[in-house]
Amino acid sequence: MSRSVLITGASRGIGRESAKLFAQNGWKVAVNYCSSERQALELVKELSDMGSEAIAVQGDVSDRSQVTAMAASLLKDFGELDVLVNNAGIAQQKLFTDITPNDWDRMFDINIKGMFHCCQCFLPQMIRRQSGKIINLSSIWGLVGSSCEVHYSAAKAAVIGFTKALAKEVGPSGIQVNCVAPGVITTEMNAALDADSLNALKEETPLGILGTPQDIAQAIYFLAESGSDFITGQVLSPNGGFVI
Ligand code: NAP
């Protein structure tokens, strides 16, 4: 029987490429999106054309009632969920002194509280089955901090603490919880960076290149597969050597 995965924020970028990789490998894929309905539906059609059982599930991960409804509809369709990829996220570049309390709350509501909602809604059926994997998206900025991204860096550092603590708690239930902390990846998230900034980041990267969403999808997929069954509470950081 095909295994099933939910990828939050799969309408674009890293989530979208991850959805394709899971589908190529015969998984049932649930594509979560918040506002990019057209992209999500196009992706589901593409995955279905590839022979995958794919569904789109709308829901703002920062809203508990929407995540609860999403979990109910997904579990009705798929029966159970084997892998949860907490990928939905936002970024923002601002001087620390310009960050408003609303900016701060939104950053934490989506990037870390969303993970809390999704894990609480999908863990009970994993615990019942004594099996499941959770993969959380952090960032190199959660490891080393980024100037003008204090709220983003702090939220992504929180993802690492969350991952390690939850891995300890649910390991005895047969569930692995790991984290992927990408370097700079060419997605819409970095669309605000100008060519000079992107070149500077490239030059700072030992491999001399920026990452692609496909690079990160491969790391996520590795942590979802049975080859990583002995790995839990870890941070895998595909970053071209930017952080060593
Ligand atoms: P992206 O291209 O900007 O896509 C973000 C995705 O998150 C979209 O599918 C978006 O869906 C979804 N999303 C945003 N807010 C949401 C919400 N409240 N509820 C549900 N979905 C929501 O971003 P990306 O570059 O692929 O990043 C994916 C993850 O990797 C993020 O957690 C990010 O922090 C992390 N990351 C990215 C980089 C990078 O350089 N790109 C580096 C390190 C870590 P809608 O369009 O439907 O709103």
Image (cartoon, rainbow, N blue to C red):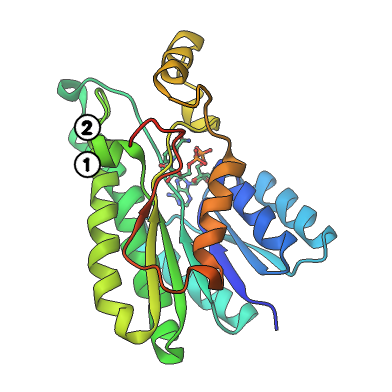
Place of residue 213 in the rendered image (x, y in percent of width and height, measured from the top left): 58, 40
- How many discs appear? 2
Above or below for 16 versus 164: above
Does residue 183 lie above or below 158 as drawn? above
**How dense is the environment of label 2, judged by Cα within 10 Å: few (below 14), some, or many (20 and up)?**
many
Q: Is residue 1 left or right of residue 195?
A: right
Name the residue nearer the viewer: 22 or 188: 22
Name the disc covering residue 154, or none. Answer: 1
Rendered location of residue 237, percent (x, y): 40, 45
Taking the image as shown, residue 114 lies to the left or right of residue 5, namely left
Does mark 2 have its CB less than 8 Å from ligand 1?
no
Q: Are marks 1 and 2 in contact (CB under 8 Å)?
A: yes
Q: Residue at x 25, y 60 (%)?
A: 162
Amino acid type indicated by mark 2: Val
User: Image point 30% across, 70% down: which residue?
Assistant: 167
> In this rendering, does residue 147 appear at all?
yes
Quarter of the image holding residue 13? top right
What is the three-letter code of the residue carrying label 1?
Ala
Position of 20 relative to 192 (above/below): below
Q: Residue at x 35, y 65 (%)?
A: 117
Q: Nearer the viewer, residue 2 or 192?
A: 2
Q: Quadrant of residue 197?
A: top left
Look at the numbered disc 2 and give the secondary structure of its residue. helix
Outermost residue to the top: 196
Residue annotated with mark 2? 150
- Whole-percent x, y for residue 42 in the image: 74, 49
